[in-house]
Amino acid sequence: MKHFRTIPIVSALSAVLLTVGMLTTINSAGAAGTKIIKVPIAELASQTGALAVPSIPAIQATQYAVSQINKTGFKIKGKTYKLALTVKNDNSDPATAVQATTGLISKHIVAMFGPFGPDAPPVATLTNKAKVLLFDPSSALAATSGPPSGAYNFVTSGDPSAIGTTMVAAIKAFVPGAKSVAFLAPNEDPVTSDVTVIQAAAAKAGLTFYNDIYPFGTTVLSSVLTTMAGQDPSAVIMLDGTSDYQLQAPQFASSGVPKSVVMLQYGATSSTCQTYGLANGYACIADTVAGVNFSASNLPALDSAWLKGFAKYTGKNLAYAISNGSFATYSYDYVFMLVQAMEKAGTVTNTTQIANALRGHVVRNGLVGRITFNSHDLPEFPLFFAYVPLTGPIQNKSFAP
C-alpha cells in the first residue's frame, strides 16, 4: 500500500509546523513561502481479513484521489489547503473498527472513508455523534443516513431502493417477458438487508419473487438450487461477490436449473459473467453497481484514462485496475466531492455546513457518471448493466435511479 506525504519537509528552516485546532499549517519550500493548511481525513478499511478484497482497492482509490488533489491543493477564501490522509486497518472486525474510529476521532479528523459490511454501523454511530463526515459504501447505513438521525453519514454505493429498482429494470429490459426472479445469496450482511428492497422492487414491477437465501458457509448448494429449479424463475439475482459466483454458478446445471434462467451477478463485470455465467451455459447480466463497466471495450475516455492512472499509481497492471475498479468507485469520486463541498461551504472545519453543501448543491461528473446526494445523504447516479447472451454481442445499458 502506498502512503503519500502532502508536503515534503526540506529542512527545519523551510518547514514550520503549527498546530491550530484540527489543522496544521506548513510553510511551503516553494512559491515564496506559500502557507498550506493540511486538513486531516482518514480511511478505515480492511487491509486484512474477510473484507480485504473490496477494501484494498477502495483504500488505494482514496489515496489516489488525495494525491491528485494535493498536487495543487484547493483554495477557500484565499487560503490554500491540502488533505492529510491517515489509513487504519480494521482487520474486518467490528470491535477493531470501533477502537480505531475512537482513536481517529481523538485526532480531530474532519471526514472518514470506509469501512465495509458489518463494521460500518457501529463506526457510523461514533462518527455521527462526533460530527465527523463519514463516506461509506455499506447499504446497512442507508436506512439511518441523512438528517436528523444520521446527518453526517453519506452512503457511497447508491440508494438501495434505486439499486433494487434498476436490477429489476435490467431484468425486464434484457429478459423480455420475465415473470419471476429468485434471490440467491448467503445470509450475511448486507444480503439480509437487501432482500426487502429487491422484493419490493420485484413486486412493483409485477414479478414473482423467490427468496433462496442459504446459510453462510454452505458450499454444497444442491438443496437450495433444486428448490430454485422447481421455481423456474426468469432470472436469478446472485450475491455478493466473485467467490460466491464461483461457488454458485457451476452447481446450477447439476441441480437442474433450466438453461433458460438468466443470471444477474451483483457487483460483477461482463468478464465475470463470461467466466461464471456463459461458461456454465447461462446468459448473464453483470450489475456493476456503478455507472461504468471497466471491462467494456468501448470505455469513455475519462474512465479509460483513469484506469491507466490508477494502475500506475498502485504499481499494478491494467488487469488489476479493471477487475478492482468497481470497488474504487466507492471512494474515489467522493474525495473530490468532499473538497467541492468545503469550497461551497467556505469552510474545512464546520462539518454541519459541509454536509449541508453536499446535499443537492454539489455535482460531480465522475467515474460513475453524474453524482449528487439527495436529502437522505444517498447518492444518485445512473447504474450500468452489461448483458452477456449465449450467442451474439454483449449489450450495454444504463438505468437512471
Image: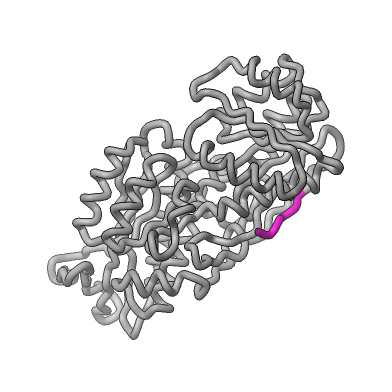
The percent coordinates of residue 40 (x first, y second) are 28, 62
The residue depicted at 34 percent of the width and 48 percent of the height is 44
- Residue 16: in sight, yes or no? no
Determine the image quadrant of residue 107.
bottom left
Q: How many marks?
A: 0
Q: Residue furthest left?
A: 12
Nearer to us in this view, 382 or 47: 382
Q: Is residue 214 above or below residue 266?
A: above
Left or right for 284, reference 307: right
Magenta-highlighted residues: 396-401
Q: Quadrant of the N terminus?
A: top left
- Residue 236: in sight, yes or no? yes
The residue depicted at 43 percent of the width and 43 percent of the height is 116
Q: Give the colour scheme of this rendering.
A: one colour
The residue depicted at 79 percent of the width and 43 percent of the height is 394
The residue depicted at 60 percent of the width and 48 percent of the height is 289
Nearer to us in this view, 132 or 230: 230
Nearer to us in this view, 276 or 133: 133
Left or right for 281, reference 190: right
